Amino acid sequence: MTRERDEIAVVGAGLAGCLLACFLARRGHQVALYERRPDPRSGTPERGRSINLALSERGLDALRRIGLAEQVMADALPMRGRMVHPVHGAPGLQSYSASGDRAINSISRGALNNALLEAAAKLPGVRIAFEHRLVGLDPATGTMTFETPGGAVTEGARVVLGTDGAGSAVRGQLLAHDLVTESVDFLDYGYKELTIPPLGGDFALDPGALHIWPRGTSMMIALPNPDRSFTCTLFWPTHGTASFASLGSAAAIERHFAQHYPDLPPIAPNLVDDYQHNPVGVLGTVRCDPWQVDGRVALLGDAAHAIVPFYGQGANCAFEDVVELDRCLDECAGDWSAALPLFQHRRQDNADAIARMALTNFVEMRDKVASPVYRTRKRVEHALERALPGRYVSQYELVSFSTVPYAQVRRRVRRQYQVVGLAAAGLAALAGAAVAFGLRRLR
């Protein structure tokens, strides 16, 4: 039996889903928030799954709108730059901003999810159903079928919004009805997490930076946690001689890290155990079209446009989706059939832009940050930002420290590079002319 409800259904109670429930409830909607997992507030995190993320201005802007930014930032650890760890020699800090004082924030993913879940649960009109796995959806009617511990349950909703991640069940249902097309581009890389525990009750590394070990075709990063540990993430090829598949025994793991990450083993006593028992995750970009069907079913966040994590923008981009949908509902006077197509129109190019920038940033992080040429380019870029405040702004600052739409960021940065290139060519020509003039005078 289908229970008809005058509700907006949000499928997926992760970061984007809980934030969306808060925004919709504030608009006066009755909201049903469905989650396939048990209540995360009463469980323990899954081993080897990220416990922190990088929250920046786009995500903070969304949290400010529901009054949660101050609470969330109380446990944030600001990271003002990349601390680059070479194989030999001392680490060096590369500031994210020209001023050196702007930061992205390491936040506990679980704590942020719980804060958003608590905020949603306190709002009138929000109903939360855990252990509800979506197995059926009729897009024409909004009728949903869930598997639950008590058996199959059928529910109805006016509008169904899928915020259930890269492997979205809502998107899967739309695919099954031939209502969307999908592409998933996997990298030949995976990720595995390790832990650096507190050392003598304090951080083993500088907590004011995102640590990175660039190794050409692979890398490792580490983000600080409030408990003074660090979560390390290896981004390695899945096949080949220097890949996850190539290390089996404890001795091989120890040799590899001693050779390629020599400063890690002394501060990571559980390195071998973490490596052998934590899973290898997949990395890929998800694109689909359309994001909505008939103004009744829509996808947001990773369900519509999952990206690789190398710009730290996955959650920030999803939060920005929620803000834009709220803005579209305002402009369309609450008419979902008008607001959902407008939402896709405004966000799809931006989602594609950050997906491309994230892939490019992977190459930068693993291959370029350790090179003298890259460091010189960044110094020049910061000098231009100081000399031309507001007129020349780096791509990183525009992405992480502003809410300028991602597609506009790409266009603006291309124009800046063109202007700088022309200026450099002009200066080179002037210098050449001056040298030629000087030589003529010497004759």
Image: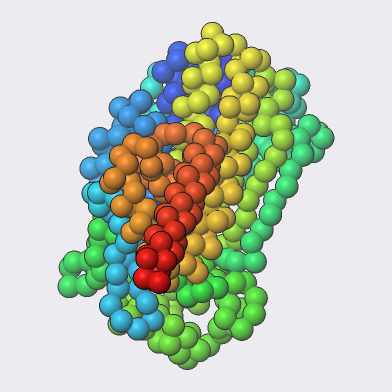
Residue 127's x, y, as percent? 48, 25
Q: Is residue 4 above or below residue 399?
A: above
| Quadrant where the N terminus is found in the figure | top right
Q: Outermost residue toward the top?
A: 333
* Residue drawn at (61%, 21%) of the image: 342
Residue 398 vs residue 79: left or right?
Answer: right
Task: Return the residue nearer the eye: 256 or 101.
Answer: 101
Task: Return the residue nearer the eye: 130 or 109.
Answer: 109
Residue 363's x, y, as percent? 53, 63
Q: How many marks?
A: 0
Does residue 208 appear anywhere in the picture?
Answer: yes
* Residue drawn at (56%, 84%) of the image: 248
The quarter of the picture where residue 162 lies is top right
Task: Return the residue nearer the eye: 413 or 227.
Answer: 413
* Residue drawn at (62%, 34%) of the image: 348
Residue 200 vs residue 415: left or right?
Answer: left
Residue 2's x, y, as percent? 69, 22
Does residue 192 appear anywhere in the picture?
Answer: no
Residue 13 vs residue 123: left or right?
Answer: right
Q: Is residue 34 above or below residue 45?
A: above
| Quadrant where the C terminus is found in the figure | bottom left
Residue 298's x, y, as percent? 64, 28
Q: Outermost residue toward the right?
A: 178
Task: Return the residue nearer the eye: 47 or 223.
Answer: 223
Query: Which color scheme is applied?
Result: rainbow
Residue 268 vs residue 337: left or right?
Answer: left
* Residue drawn at (60%, 17%) of the image: 339
Q: Outermost residue toward the front?
A: 443
